[in-house]
Image (cartoon, rainbow, N blue to C red):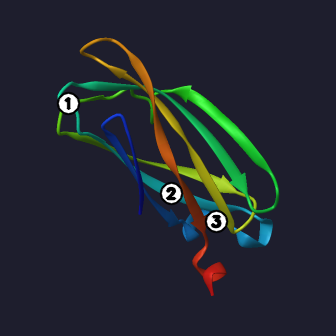
Amino acid sequence: MVSAVTEGVTISVETFYQPDHSNPLSGDYMFAYRITVENNNTFPVRLLRRHWYIFDSNGSWKEVDGEGVVGVQPVIQPSDQYQYVSGCGLKSEMGKMHGYYLMENLQNRKQFQANIPLFEMMAPFKAN
């Protein structure tokens, strides 16, 4: 697990290879990631947007931007956390992702970027 803290918001990421949803013979590798967003502030925050940089070890990369996460823009109360699971498909057995969430301090309505730490996705058989 990797974590990053930005303006009192801790973002932690765990990754999992999904063999049942992958087909190495056709170059399709699926990974899941579990993200925990923890609000260590004294005020509530809302996750408004996500922005991802996704790198595949075959040399390709892409950017993904959109509203919220998994269809919601969660409000995270002080000392609380929000957790979700999503996925990423690659064309090789290794890759990495990082990015940021656009967050809003609901007390003063100011927005800030919370960094999502760089994390790796690697099929277990590649680690040997």
Question: SS at mark 2?
Answer: strand
In this rendered view, identify the residue nearer to me: 10 or 60: 10
Residue drawn at point x = 61 percent, y = 69 percent? 122
What amino acid is found at the position of numbered circle 1 in the picture?
Gln
Q: Residues within 10 Å of mark 3 (few under 14, many from 20)?
A: some
Residue 53: image x %, image y %? 65, 43
Residue 90 sits in which quadrant? bottom right
Q: Position of residue 33 (x, y in %)?
A: 47, 55
Mark 1 Cα shell of 10 Å, populated few (<14), some (14-19), many (≥20): some
Q: Is mark 2 in CB contact (under 8 Å) with mark 1?
A: no
Q: Which residue is mark 1?
A: 77
Residue 32's disc is 2
| Nearest to N terminus: mark 3 or mark 2 | 3
* Residue 21 position in % (x across, y down): 59, 62
Report the Cα–Cα distance between label 2 and label 1. Answer: 26 Å
Q: Is residue 101 left or right of residue 11?
A: right
Of callouts 2 and 1, the N-terminal one? 2
Q: Split into 4 quadrants, where in the image is the N terminus?
A: bottom left
Of residue 62 and residue 115, the one placed in the foreground of this image is: 115
The mark found on residue 116 in the picture is: none
- The residue sitting at the bottom extreme is 128
Q: Secondary structure at mark 3?
A: loop
Residue 25 left/right relative to 38: right
**Percent coordinates x, y for residue 92 in the rendering:** 74, 65
Residue placed under numbered mark 3 in the picture: 22
Q: Amino acid at mark 3?
A: Ser
Query: Residue type at mark 2?
Result: Ala
Q: Are marks 3 and 2 in contact (CB under 8 Å)?
A: no
Above or below 41: residue 67: above
Q: Relative to 27, is 81 on the left or the right?
A: left
